[in-house]
Amino acid sequence: MSLTRIRIFDILNYLLLALFVVICVYPFYYVLIYSISSPAKVAQGIFLLPAGLDFTTYKSILQLPYIVNSFFISAARTIVGTMLTILCCSLFSYLISKPEMALRKLVYRLLVVTLYINAGLIPWYITMKMLHLNNNFLLYVLPSAVSGYYVILMKTYIEQIPKALEESAMIDGAGYLTLFWKVIFPLCKPIVATVAIFAAVGQWNNWMDNYFLVQNQNLKTMQLILYEYLNSANALATMDAASITRNAQNVVLTPESIKMATTMLVALPILLVYPFLQRYFVKGIMLGAVKG
């Protein structure tokens, strides 16, 4: 009797988990099959399979001016910005975890304040202009170099590392900088991977700074180029009685098909990278969030 109950419980568990997986995965699958369906046939509705395999929307997007250059700009800001964030946040976290640091508590409290108080868009815009970061690649990486949330996560993680490791290294003559690079930082791999995922996703998806402060086409990110293309497609569809747009080859495109294709293009890099860092992400976020 108990064995039967266990089997029924297991079957129900598997069914619920399968349902949960379908709920999570199907939206991505739907966006994918919609983006590769024929824009003329997709209006009839799709559910499991694409309606007429058609890559015209992707071809149209990849033929946009500056699209290749914008991809490299997006990749560069993601890589450089993430590395700079990890470097600055980890070093800052290590410093404020040391009781010997002067004004450590005051600095930490000021850091916490930044989590709750934001100056707003206009002060941020004026500050960036005064620092001459408009139309400058440094706009993408410098303002996000230090984040209060990441620093708190890393500081909490560093404080859980046994002090004996640092003491033994100091007896061997290591200074604070050597301790950080050769002892502390290698042990922070889970929390570094966690912060790297957060920072990389934030950098990859961010386009507001680009939208407000960059007019140079050679510095625009792929997200902004696609956003502008989607807006132009929507505007053309609004003027067109049939609610359709046509590309240079006179092929019918709809704003919805363009929206689905752009969604896949901007989400695909993150979807490909995340599975490789997922195991570090879970461990890092748990250890960094819990005070030992």
Image (cartoon, rainbow, N blue to C red):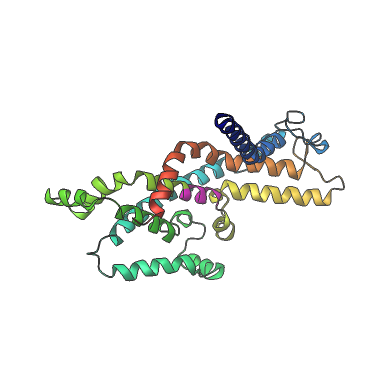
**Residue 60 percent location from the top left of the image:** 69, 37
Image spot of residue 191 (x, y percent): 38, 48
- The quadrant the N terminus occupies is top right
Q: Main secondary structure of the magenta part?
A: helix
Image: 44 above or below 154: above
Q: Is residue 1 above or below residue 284?
A: above
Indicate the position of residue 197 as horizontal and vertical percent values: 46, 46
The magenta region covers 198-206
Residue 12: percent from left, percent from top: 62, 35
**Left-right relation of 107 to 37:** left
Q: Does the magenta stretch include residue 205?
A: yes
Q: Going 41% across and 54% down the picture, which residue do you hit?
A: 289
Please report the residue visible at 81 percent of the width from the left and 38 percent of the height from the top: 43
Q: Is 12 on the left-hand or right-hand side of 181?
A: right
Q: Is residue 239 left or right of residue 84?
A: right
Q: Which of 240 and 168 is in front in this view?
A: 168
- Magenta span includes 142: no
Q: Quadrant of residue 29?
A: top right
Residue located 77% across and 52% down the image: 235
- In the foreground, 219 or 202: 202
Q: Quadrant of the C terminus?
A: bottom left
Total of numbered circles in the picture?
Answer: 0
Q: Residue furthest right?
A: 241
Q: Can residue 247 be seen in this view?
A: yes
